[in-house]
Structure formats: structure tokens, C-alpha cells
Amino acid sequence: MTSAILRRQLDRAYPVAVGGHGIYIRDSGGKRYLDACGGAAVSSLGHNHPAVIAAMRAQLGRVDYVHSSFFSSTAAEDLADDLVRHAPIGVSHVTLVSGGSEAAETALKLARQAAVERGDSRRINVISRRQSYHGNTLGALAVSGNVPRRRLYGPLLFGAHFTEPCFEYRFRRSGETSEDYGLRVANALEQKILELGPDTVLAFIAETVVGATSGATPPVKGYFRRIREICDRYGCLLILDEVMCGMGRTGTLHACAQEGVAPDLMTVAKGLGSGVVPIGAVFVHKAIHDAIAAGSKTYFHGFTYMAHPLCCAAALAVQETLRKEDLLGNVQARGGQLRRLLDERLGEHPNVGDIRGRGLLLAIEFVSDRLDKTPFAPDQKVFRRVSDAALDHGLMIYGMGGTVDGYMGDHILLAPPYIVRSTEIEEIVDRLEVAVRSAIPS
Ligand SMILES: Cc1ncc(COP(=O)(O)O)c(C=O)c1O
């Protein structure tokens, strides 16, 4: 079919989605897909949840759009109150944007503004980690350690600095405990700060659980506590990116709750609006708010569509539904079930190197040799073969290459909606097993 849309792959035909219900999507040819990745870990409540639709219908009869330099809206105020009430400790405000990349831009700019307001204008260096992703706009991409996404745009990106990821399966040394490994890679941040000059460092940005780039990679115990100590010691702001792993996806509302740390700034998006509306947010620590309040009193940043009432009404309905239907409990229960079934059915497959993740953000990393963890050659495109085979069986999974270092490695991500039922988890694993065994015959 010809299309006037500039497609992601110009030589690929995309089915047209015409319906969605629960965890299923239907295309114009009548084919039904089980959405086991929520698109890109977006749909938290599944498709067409009635509570969200009702909230949006009600909002459309009230206020459709107001610009934030003229008005606030009840929908935006109510959502902000709700988010702050359940926020990590120290957060006093949120700013509402339209997605994850806008949230990353906003967090970086707020970090810089806070430093300048405090008279710390020498702080310009942002440190990120290799094998990370924070968004596709130029600022967010500049601090993303995702090699394939940066490659073409390198010359346009500002010079951020990169340190070690926390990626135990790949980089923990033999004989090293998990905790020692975590301390070693956290301490690499301190080294980087000292190298750059502590009074020049603005912020460190990290996904609490790495999402698509290396595949649902959780931090080891103690890593983020050490990171928090280092940031505090040198006045470096800690920006946590929970665009993919936050808002319930890992079984707690915020992934950082499982690490026992709180951020200075935190970005969320995806699950916040469940994909029904484009929305993101930045959680702002009181100290950052206070620095601006004591200084210019002006937030030097904004977007036309920030705090859009329709998006806010939908996102608030998502939050209320999470609580009403105890969906965090379901994420924990179904996440545990999915993990168990993956271990049982694919854990011994000779090309499954690692099954990892938290809650309903799980990944399988494929290898050509389990013993020495040798990845497949990139031109074999194993991740694509597996995800294409899954799609042939009506199963949507999120495949990605470059798992190890941006070049080598393959993984698939599973991130079904939080409403997923026990029988649907079984169906996901049944179809996935068939897809893996047909794409990588052992
Ligand atoms: C961890 C993370 N941060 C930021 C982004 C960017 O979000 P968006 O695509 O909504 O701009 C993504 C998107 O996949 C993400 O996974």
C-alpha cells in the first residue's frame, strides 16, 4: 500500500491498526495481535480502557486547550497533585510535557537553571552512561549512550560525558560479587567527576532500569545508593529516567523505590498516559524549585502543549485506575509468572544467554554460545528474526540489536499491559517459544 507517511522503514509494509481492546490490537485485514510489549512499553492499561475514555470525554466538554502562560486547568492541577502526592521523597512539584524526550530536555534545562540560580554557572558537564537512551531530540540524544541512534547525528550533539553502565550479565568480572561490581561501576562516576572537575559537573542521568538499549537491565543492589552518595558529595544532580521503567512498570510506582534512593529530577512518560495521550512529566525536588523561587522566579522553558488538559485528564484516570484495580499488585504477580514461565520454557535454550528484568519489563538476551556469552554476528539480525517470527504468530514483542555495546548483541523486550491476565501470560510464552524455536533452531 502506498502511503503519504514517512515510514520508519521505507521498504516495509505496515499493517493498519483499526481496533484495540485489552491487550489485543486488530488490523484492517482482520488479523489479531497480542500486544506483549505495549508498543514500546507504553500501554499500561491496555487498549481502550473505559475509565480513561470516560475521563477524556468529560474533559472535552470542559476546557480543550489553554496556554500555560495564561491559565492553569483543573485537569493539570489535579494530575500534578496526584503525582506529587505519590512521588519519591523530596519532590515538591512536577512539570507536564508531551513525552519522554521533552521530559529529558526539560530535566537537563532545569538542572542548568537551578545551578545558575545558585550562582554555580560553571556547572555545564552532564555525565551519562554507555548503553542508555534518554530520547531522540538533540539534547536528549546528546546524553544518550545508544550508539545506533546517535551515529548519524553525532556532529550536532553537545559534548556529554559517558561512564560505565551497570550491566551485570555482561560486565561483572568472574570472582567479583554483584555488590562489588555495583560499587566499582558507581565509583567510575566519581572518577569521571574528578576528571572533569567537580565544580563543573551539572548532572548525572541514568535509567533506573535500562529499557530498550540493553534490554530490561536492572541495577545491582547498592549501585544507586552509592551513586546517590557520589552525587551528593560533589553537588551533581541525579536525574533518573523512568520514562520506560517508571509509573508502575517494574511493580512499584517508581522504579527508584526499589533502590532506596530519590532523585533530584526524574522523567516519566509512556505508562503515565498509557499511550492513550502523549504525555510526560518531570518530577522536581523541592531544593530545585526553591533555588528558582529564591532567584529569578521564572521557569525559563516551556512548550505550547505542556499540561494539555485532555492529556492530563487521561493521565489522572490512568493513575486512579492503577489504584482502583490494584494493578501494581498485578504487575508483581504477572511479572513473577512471566519470569517463571520464561525460565522454564526458554531458560535452557542453547541460545538464550540471560533472562532478566523487573515486574512487567523483562528481556531475553540471545547468544551464539551460552558458556562464553558470545553474541551472534550483527548481520544475522537475530533480534529481528525472532520478533518477525513472533509477529507472524500474532505476537508483538520489541526486538533490538546492539545489546552489548551498540554493535553486538540481540535481545527482545516483553512489556505487556499491567491488566494482563494469567491465561494471557501463558499465551505470550506459548507463542514466544514457537517464535524463538523457529527463528533460532537449536
Ligand atoms: C528510557 C527512555 N527515555 C526516554 C525516551 C524518549 O521518550 P519519547 O519517545 O516519548 O520521546 C524513551 C523512549 O523509548 C525511553 O525508553
Image (cartoon, helix red, strand yellow):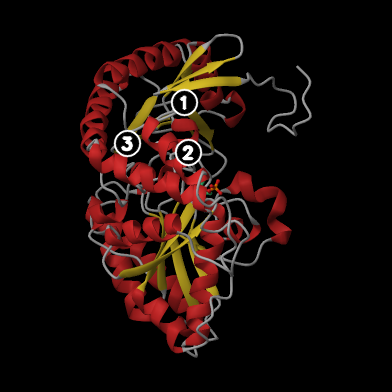
Give the answer, above or below, for where 402 lies relative to 234.
above
Q: Confirm if mark 2 falls within 8 A of ligand 1.
A: no
Q: For the point 42% across and 12% down, which residue is it?
A: 437
Badge number at residue 374: none
Describe residue 199's horizontal placement relative to residue 13 as left or right. left
Amino acid at the residue labelled 2: Arg
How many C-alpha atoms fall within 10 Å of the one at disc 1: few (<14), some, or many (≥20)? many
C-alpha span from label 2 to label 1: 31 Å
Q: Distance between the residues labelled 3 and 1?
A: 15 Å
Residue identified by numbered label 2: 57
Quarter-of-image position of residue 169: top left
Please tell me which of labels 2 and 3 falls first in the chain.
Answer: 2
Mark 2 is surrounded, within 10 Å at the Cα level, by few (under 14), some (14 to 19) or many (20 or more) other residues, namely: few
Residue 43 in view of the camera: no
User: Residue 162 placed where, x, y %?
Assistant: 51, 62
Distance from Cα at disc 2 to Cα at disc 3 = 39 Å
Numbered tag placed on residue 356 in the rendering: 3
Which amino acid does the dot numbered 3 rest on?
Answer: Arg
Cβ of mark 1 under 8 Å from ligand 1: the answer is no
Q: Does residue 213 appear left or right of residue 358 in this picture?
A: right
Residue type pointed to by label 1 = Ile
Question: Residue tagged by mark 1?
Answer: 397
